[in-house]
Image (cartoon, rainbow, N blue to C red):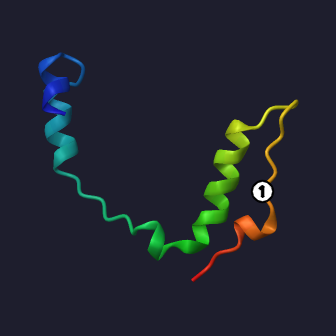
Amino acid sequence: MPTLVAAHGFRLDLLYRVRSIELQVPTLRERREDIPMLAAHFASERATAQRPVVLLPDALSVHV
């Protein structure tokens, strides 16, 4: 971020505000139930009418 500030790509006052906020996000390893939803989202972004992306149930199963 400091390089973006120096290149005038990011406001310095906003950088200080953002740095004061800390988010604790669990890893995907701790949120395995989110993996099928994320896989479907990214697959739909890549799909087109001519080239649909189909995720098989085995690919979406969550292994512990």
Q: What residue would you read off at disc 1? A: 55
Q: Residue furthest right?
A: 50
- Residue under the point 17% across and 16% down: 7
Q: Is residue 49 above or below residue 43?
A: above
Is residue 49 or residue 17 the one in the foreground?
Answer: 49
Going by the image, does 29 lie left or right of 4? right
Going by the image, does 54 lie left or right of 12? right
Q: Looking at numbered disc 1 in the image, what kind of residue is underneath it?
A: Leu
- Residue under the point 80% across and 62% down: 56
SS for dot 1:
loop
Going by the image, does 25 lie left or right of 21? right
In the rendered image, residue 22, in percent from the top left (x then y), is placed at: 24, 57
- Residue under the point 88% across and 30% down: 50
- Residue under the point 80% across and 32% down: 48
In the rendered image, residue 25, in percent from the top left (x then y), is placed at: 37, 64
**Quarter residue 1 falls in:** top left
